[in-house]
Image (cartoon, rainbow, N blue to C red):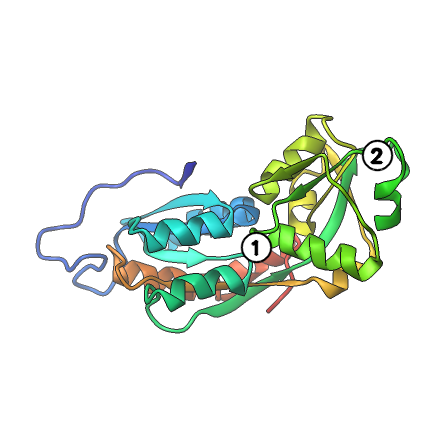
Amino acid sequence: MVAVAGLAVSGCAGDEAPGGAADGRVTGTVTVFAAASLTESFTRIGSDFETANPGSSVTFNFAGSSALANQINQGAPADVFASAAPTNMTTVTKAGNADGTPSTFARNQLVIAVPRGNPKGVTGLADLIRPGVKVALCAEQVPCGAAARTALDAAGVALTPVTLEQDVKGALAKVKLGEVDAALVYRSDARAAAADVTGVEFPESARAVNDYPIVALKEAPNPAGARAFVAYVRSAPAQAVLAEAGFQAP
């Protein structure tokens, strides 16, 4: 799915270079492929970027990092890739589709998302294998699934989920809809859904902290915009948005 942050704007003047006005301002559309767990924070960051760069418009494609990496390597037009783990970023860089070296802009840690009030009394990973407790996980090829497997192995918990989702928002939705009793999701996602779920911290999550790298893409339709957006994500205002959302500093 593609989500658009902000309002559409008119095109650049004919004498402007793609993505940049004659006075050096960033203009035009910047297309960002970003991990699903970045949905809320990047939507806000995109809006702030547009405000700071009149004449620009940020469009997002939010999905699982593995799916996004595959889309980029198959030629999908994008300016920036922000992944929820270095592994999926490596898929893009090894294919020669990154413009420069990716940089880590945030980190994220897992929690156990349970319905508000925690009706099953879940306090740790061991509770997820109690009879009658239904759990959703992300598929292991996406970062939240790989992190969940690392944490479960560290705890010595052999968990069989009732569903495997293609991104963290899918796993969280199962809890919100009452289809499962718990899901392993990122702290930032549980915080964004605080009206519906509670995030239960557990010590093994420290063994599975994900680094989030970002990079401008080699075939970016708007190379100036791509570089500017990457720089903005690492700026103090954007880092404050990420911290408020529950991300850790890189």
In the rendering, at what x and y percent does residue 96 appear?
32, 67
Q: Is residue 110 visible?
A: yes
Identify the element where label 1 is drawn.
helix
Task: Identify the image quadrant of the N terminus.
Answer: top left
Q: Is residue 51 visible?
A: no
Query: Do the residues under discs 1 and 2 have CB atoms within 8 angstroms?
Result: no
In the rendering, at what x and y percent does residue 143 appear?
59, 54
Q: Depth check: 217 or 59 in front? A: 217
In the rendering, at what x and y percent does residue 34 appear?
46, 51
Mark 1–mark 2 Cα distance, whole angstroms, equals 34 Å
Which numbered tag is attached to residue 133? 2
- Say which amino acid is labelled 1: Val
Q: Is residue 85 above or below residue 42?
A: below
Disc 2 crowd rating (10 Å Cα; few below 14, some 14-19, many 20+) is some
Q: Depth check: 74 or 194 in front? A: 74
Would residue 110 be found to the left or right of residue 124 on screen? Answer: left
Disc 1 crowd rating (10 Å Cα; few below 14, some 14-19, many 20+) is some
Q: Is residue 148 above or below residue 89?
A: above
Residue at image x 55%, y 57%?
A: 84
Identify the element where label 2 is drawn.
loop
Which numbered tag is attached to residue 12? none
In the rendering, at what x and y percent does residue 163 appear?
67, 35
Work out whether mark 1 precedes mark 2 in sequence or the reverse, and give the earlier one: 2
State which quadrant residue 107 falls in. Answer: bottom right
Would residue 193 be found to the left or right of residue 76 on screen? Answer: right
Residue at image x 63%, y 51%?
A: 144
Would residue 14 be found to the left or right of residue 198 on screen? Answer: left
Q: Which residue is mark 1?
A: 241
